[in-house]
Image: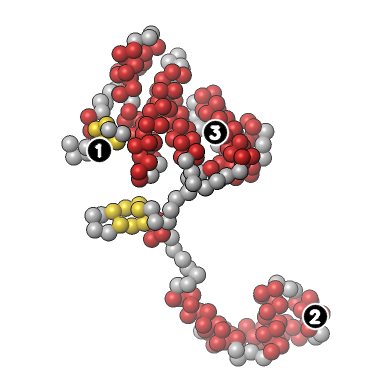
């Protein structure tokens, strides 16, 4: 009972484990109209729903809701599965379970998305399910866009817009003493000590340049002008601009190194 977990009121450690051959035989009875076999088949595949829920990281207090929604996807998969296809039931069911959970997360997302974008996203998800049934594999975004006759960028943007937003405070690991959150795994190089020292050193070095040298570096490396454009604005030859630029960079390098 070490792995005992309750989700939606179900003790997952007590869920049955059936071999693929047993699943196939049970499915034959289900398709023959055996309601008892259907109930057995649902219980036998609850581990499948649990595995999908775990893919979504549990999502905290939404785990129970996702499990129940995933069971709806499981029931749809049972009703629509074609046993004549040479495909495992789990291969067919997982995309349908994922689709139900994603719809649930999308509809309960706190971020509001415009109706037109949601419509494209819903069409893309529906197309994905249809392509899954047809090809028995998860389609790429390019295939979905081609199926809908829509630009790939539009489909990608719509699907991204309805994906669930994660909080930076969401925990990703806990060893009993310390909790690691998403924000702890995100590096910020902008204000690191090393970069700060480099900025200070660069600032001090630039202070040693002449006014003309500072102006040339500003136009060349901040504004992005060519030496010819700088020479026309400053009123000196391109050769002089080049010489002043090289001298300024040399001074900065000497002072920083």
* Front-most of residues 202 and 241: 202
Residue at the image point whose x is 28% and y is 53% from the top: 174
Q: Secondary structure at mark 3?
A: helix
Residue at image mark 3: 125
Residue at image mark 2: 233
Residue 141 rendering spot, x and y as whole percentages? 57, 38
Give the quarter of the image for residue 53: top left
Residue at the image point whose x is 32% and y is 53% from the top: 173
Number of numbered discs overlaid on the protein picture: 3
Residue 116 rendering spot, x and y as whole percentages? 64, 39
* Front-most of residues 14 and 195: 14
Q: Earlier in the sequence, mark 2 or mark 1?
A: 1
Q: Secondary structure at mark 2?
A: helix
Q: Earlier in the sequence, mark 3 or mark 1?
A: 1
Mark 3 crowd level (few <14, some 14–19, many ≥20, 10 Å Cα): some
Residue 218 rendering spot, x and y as whole percentages? 68, 79
Q: Between label 2 and label 1, give the one nearer the viewer.
A: 1
Q: Secondary structure at mark 1?
A: loop
Asked if residue 215 shows in the view, the reply is yes
Residue at image mark 1: 5
| Left or right of residue 118, residue 172 in this image | left
- The quadrant the N terminus occupies is top left
Mark 2 crowd level (few <14, some 14–19, many ≥20, 10 Å Cα): few
| Left or right of residue 55, residue 19 in this image | left
Q: Earlier in the sequence, mark 3 or mark 2?
A: 3
């Amino acid at each position: 009972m070490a792995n005992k977990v309750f989700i939606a009121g179900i003790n997952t450690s007590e869920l049955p484990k059936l071999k693929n051959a047993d699943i196939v035989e049970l499915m034959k009875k289900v398709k023959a109209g055996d309601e008892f076999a259907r109930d057995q088949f649902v219980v036998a595949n609850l581990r499948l729903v649990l595995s999908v829920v775990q893919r979504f990281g549990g999502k905290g207090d939404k785990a129970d809701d996702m499990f129940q929604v995933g069971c709806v996807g499981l029931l749809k998969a049972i009703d629509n599965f074609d046993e004549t296809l040479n495909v495992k039931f789990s291969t067919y069911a997982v995309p349908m379970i994922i689709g139900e959970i994603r719809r649930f997360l999308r509809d309960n997302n706190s971020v509001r998305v415009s109706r037109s974008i949601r419509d494209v996203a819903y069409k893309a998800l529906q197309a994905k399910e249809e392509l899954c049934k047809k090809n028995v594999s998860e389609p790429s975004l390019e295939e979905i866009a081609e199926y809908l006759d829509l630009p790939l960028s539009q489909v990608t943007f719509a699907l991204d817009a309805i994906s669930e937003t994660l909080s930076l405070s969401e925990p990703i690991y806990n060893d009993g003493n310390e909790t690691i959150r998403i924000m702890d795994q995100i590096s910020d190089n902008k204000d690191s000590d090393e970069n700060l020292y480099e900025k200070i050193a660069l600032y001090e070095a630039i202070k040693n340049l002449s006014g003309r040298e500072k102006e040339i570096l500003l136009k060349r490396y901040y504004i992005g002008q060519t030496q010819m454009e700088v020479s026309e604005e400053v009123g000196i030859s391109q050769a002089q601009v080049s010489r002043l630029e090289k001298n300024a960079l040399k001074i900065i390098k000497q002072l920083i190194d």
